[in-house]
Image (tube, rainbow, N blue to C red):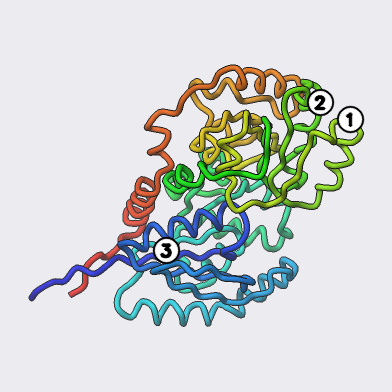
Amino acid sequence: MTRSVRRKKALFVVNSLAGGGAERVCVYLACMMSQEIDVDIVTLYEDASIPELEGVHIEALGLDRDAGKLSKFSQLIAARNRFDSFIVQREKEGRYDLVTAHLTASHLLASLSCLADRCLYVHHSLPSAVRQLYPKLLLRYIERVYSRYQSICVSDGVKRQVIEQFGADLSNITTIYNAVPYERIREKMHESIPFEGRFLLCVGRLTQSKRFDRMLNAFAAGSFHQAYSLVFLGEGPLKDDLIRQAESLGISAFVHFPGYVENPYAWMRRSSAMVMTSDREALPTVLIEGLMAGARVVSADCDFGPREILTGELAEYLVRPDCINGYVEAIERALGSYPSLDDDFIKRYGADEVIQQYFMRYEAAMGSATEVE
């Protein structure tokens, strides 16, 4: 009997297609996979505008993103039958060869579904942060999920925390770094930006965990305003606080808040240095993007991601998170000279490499049929 090789099939379960790094990683991987693989994405929430991704089928469950944690869990239980029906329909001509769930709410849905033991649970956030967001009742259930099923972590630091805090079995968990769109970065970074002069750059949501107050203090302490502006790309609840801090430091005339921009890569390339001052980061994609765009990156040596990105010669530009003088000195060093990236760095975060690792891990963990009669 003649055996015909079918296209592989992949499923992503994610909270939404709008938002932070995890969502952008899913969209990028799905788009890259869809060139040779049939890709489905199931989103928990109804996005205001769902992007059209060529070759990708998107199914939105339409849950209320603003519901409380326990109410949201009840919604997930109610949505389980609809989700299972979708899976059964889509697998009529063959099972998925890769199933991944991204972010905690999506992990919960997957764990309640017919795919519970056929899913890789991908951890983009630090478990310590997750513990602060969920009530004890749900945390006990989450611990059972992570101790039982296969997990992927986006950094070795996240992996250690998942093992320590959720009791995950070492044999059920591995690290795969996020894919970063190198080709798109190199294409978009040459576009013009609406800004003149030299500047230092921070990119990210204006929230407490990003600790951009440290950057304002370092900018003032180093008297960088004598030669540079300071630009914050991003929106967030602490914008007014940062504006007031800049005024109190006497540097407000040199600090700019363009907000969210579609193409941060051109700003990264044009910057004299790019600085991250966070309290914690799982795997800050923005650091990788900055380096690929040619930015001279300085970062807080926070748990855990930055120290896995800035290695070798780049480790010189890691700073103790709360050391303002350390930022000043590291920025000055970066402005003076900076190492070039090697090919291994680019390959480590390339889509082809990451996709191959996902399929290899899935097949090793639970097997995946690639042919049908």
Q: Which residue is drawn at 52% across and 42% down?
A: 189
Residue located farthest toward the left when viewing the structure as drawn: 1
Q: Could you say whether the residue bearing mark 1 is in a helix, strand or loop?
A: loop
Name the side, left or right, on which 99 lies relative to 219: left
Distance from label 1 to label 2 (Cα)? 8 Å
Q: Which residue is drawn at 78% across and 37% down?
A: 255
The quarter of the image holding the C terminus is bottom left
Q: Counting residues from the N terminus, which is met first, the one under dot 2 or under dot 3?
A: 3
Distance from label 2 to label 3 (Cα)? 48 Å
Front position in the image: 124 or 19: 19
**Residue count near mark 2 (Cα–Cα under 10 Å), binned few <14, some 14–19, many ≥20:** some
Identity, as a three-letter code, of the amino acid under mark 2: Ala
Residue 250's disc number: 1
User: Is the Cβ of the residue at disc 1 closer than 8 Å to that at disc 2?
Assistant: yes
Q: Counting residues from the N terminus, which is met first, the one under dot 3 or under dot 1?
A: 3
Residue holding disc 3: 99
Front position in the image: 220 or 191: 191
Identity, as a three-letter code, of the amino acid under mark 1: Gly
Residue holding disc 2: 220
Identity, as a three-letter code, of the amino acid under mark 3: Val
